Image (cartoon, rainbow, N blue to C red):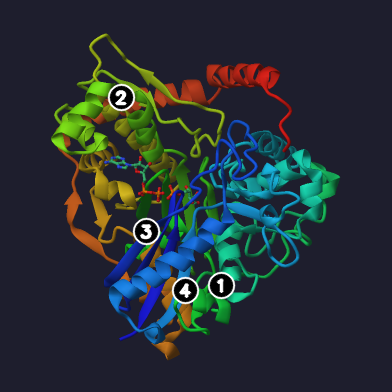
Amino acid sequence: MKYVIGIDYGTESGRAVLVDLEGREIADHVTPYPHGVIDEVLPESNVKLEQDWALQHPRDYLEVLATAVPAVLKKSGVNPADVIGIGIDFTACTMLPVDVFGEPLCFKHEVKHRPHSWVKLWKHHAAQDEANLLNEIAKKRGESFLLRYGGKISSEWMIAKIWQILNEAPDIYEQTDLFLEATDWVVFKMTGNIVRNSCTAGYKSIWHKQEGYPNREFFRALDPRLENLTETKLRGDIVPLGTKAGELTNEMAAMMGLLPGTAVAVGNVDAHAAVPGVGVVEPGKLVMAMGTSICHMLLGTEEKYVEGMCGVVEDGIIPGYFGYEAGQSAVGDIFAWYVEQGVPAYVKEAAEKEGIGIHEWLEKRAAAYKPGETGLLALDWWNGNRSVLVDTDLTGLMVGYTLLTKPEEIYRALLEATAFGTRKIIDAFVESGVKVEEIYACGGLPQKNRLLMQIYADVTNHPIKIAASKQTPAVGAAMFAAVAAGKENGGYESIVEAAKKMGKVRDEVFKPIRENVAIYEQLYQEYVKLHDYFGRGGNNVMKRLKSIKENVGLKESVNINI
Ligand SMILES: Nc1ncnc2c1ncn2[C@@H]1O[C@H](COP(=O)(O)OP(=O)(O)O)[C@@H](O)[C@H]1O
Ligand SMILES: O=C(CO)[C@@H](O)[C@@H](O)COP(=O)(O)O
């Protein structure tokens, strides 16, 4: 029997699974990142971060390799010689500057107190000014790539993040040999090879299979200092998913408890790896990776332009198809915010008394309400809007409070708001001619909250199939590892073959309930009105509030060394 290991690098933790080549999960292990999300002060130096920053510590990623891989080997009792490959997926665009040796700049004593030397996590939103200007310039120049990204390049992505570094810390930019996606950096640490994957290059760095990166004139128009960016600090081969990036080095093999020479697949993105993870390798099947955020993944046979989607990339998910991605920047994060910041003490006490978590307590009570019964309606923009408005300056909103409003009603309205956000994305796809016939869900949320899944089925009016695995992206990453290992070593010829054998969903399906669908249709139409009014310039109050807040903050802030 042969095995493969997949590691899913999430926002808070790294999750490893060891699976056999039929997709059976033999063992898993979760390693929380020791430093988590760094959004207040830098480790060691305690330098304060500004608003909208979100960083990570690259050493935490290595900690996952050193802890989670030996743990799954030990738990499973599998002989390391029978592990034929390892693959990883990551949040993205999570990027870092490295020196000529591939070492992260934040490891250097001289610059570790500088925020720009650290890993910028996908949800670092402080490059919005750069993103706005980039979009303005690209639009003025009539750059056709904008269409592939729904009309806007996000501040979460590579070019905006790099430009922020150049603007605010030009010396850090100068010292950088390469800007890498974290997924490519971890693969480099395992193999010694710097290989960029076509998925992050396509979705996050404006790279196109036929056209390559935008041309030098575009980058010069942004800033003359960026003119050579793609040949210098973004240089490197870009290869398709499933390619073997190299083999485990002696040093890393010893650290991870595997054999040197084990095949390592090129890096991938968490949500994208989840698609084959649920066995989806054809068009019409929307896969939602539901966790802190939601990524919506869809395959198509043509390159269509959809408003506000995150991108369409040829071979970006499954070779042979155009992969579409859309998303919501906060979903589980909104529920977490409410549980941590919004619920009264009596809820916490009651949940404790019942011996259940606060989410479970709220879910139980919220489930007793019918759609529309709370009288509440919310916009799901607690962390900005990623699709279809692509604007991180938008913020949250709830309408309909009364003196009788209860915490569980607010919780239910938040669950519903995120479902409406997903419905808006589905509508955008369908209106642009990209069909959505079935919905699949994976990630932590479908395993944790049944009410949420029923609401999604009712709001979208589609049955929802749930991934069999709790670690679907990791299983998908393991499938790509099987492809990287190759058939001759007991793996698979292609990801389609691997997905057919290894991808699995549960028997239970969440089906829409007719009465609920009808009421949610009415509520959704109200959501769309609020969405367009606050999101399309009818009332820019959210942006004005943010700017007032920033100005007040600026006056108060001490000189922060970025
Ligand atoms: N019972 C629950 N209902 C709804 N959301 C939950 C529940 N339990 C945890 N969450 C949220 O799920 C998110 C974590 O999702 P998960 O898929 O495990 O992680 P990640 O997004 O890092 O991959 C957190 O934002 C958390 O607030
Ligand atoms: O943006 C992407 C993928 O393109 C994700 O990595 C990002 O939303 C983070 O996902 P998680 O919510 O941590 O699973």
Q: Residue 110 carries which label?
A: none
Q: Residue 30 carries which label?
A: 3
The mark nearer the N terminus, 2 or 3, is 3
Residue 413 drawn at (x, y percent): 30, 27
Name which residue lies at 35% across and 75% down. 73
Residue 553 drawn at (x, y percent): 64, 20
Mark 1 touches mark 3? (CB < 8 Å): no
Observer-side mark, 2 or 4, equals 4
Q: Distance between the residues labelled 1 and 4?
A: 10 Å
Q: Which mark is residue 190?
A: 1
Q: Which mark is residue 256?
A: 4
Label 1 residue SS: helix
Work out whether residue 267 can be spotted: yes
The mark nearer the N terminus, 4 or 3, is 3
Amino acid at pointer 4:
Met
The mark nearer the N terminus, 1 or 4, is 1
The correct choice, above or below, for 1 with respect to 142 in the image is: below
Q: In this view, does 203 lie to the left or right of 64?
A: right
Label 4 residue SS: helix
Residue 409 lies in quadrant: top left
Q: Does the beta carbon at disc 3 come under 8 Å from ligand 1? A: no
Q: How far apart are marks 2 and 3 (CA)?
A: 28 Å
Residue 426 drawn at (x, y percent): 39, 43
> Which residue matches tag 2?
343
Residue 249 drawn at (x, y percent): 57, 79
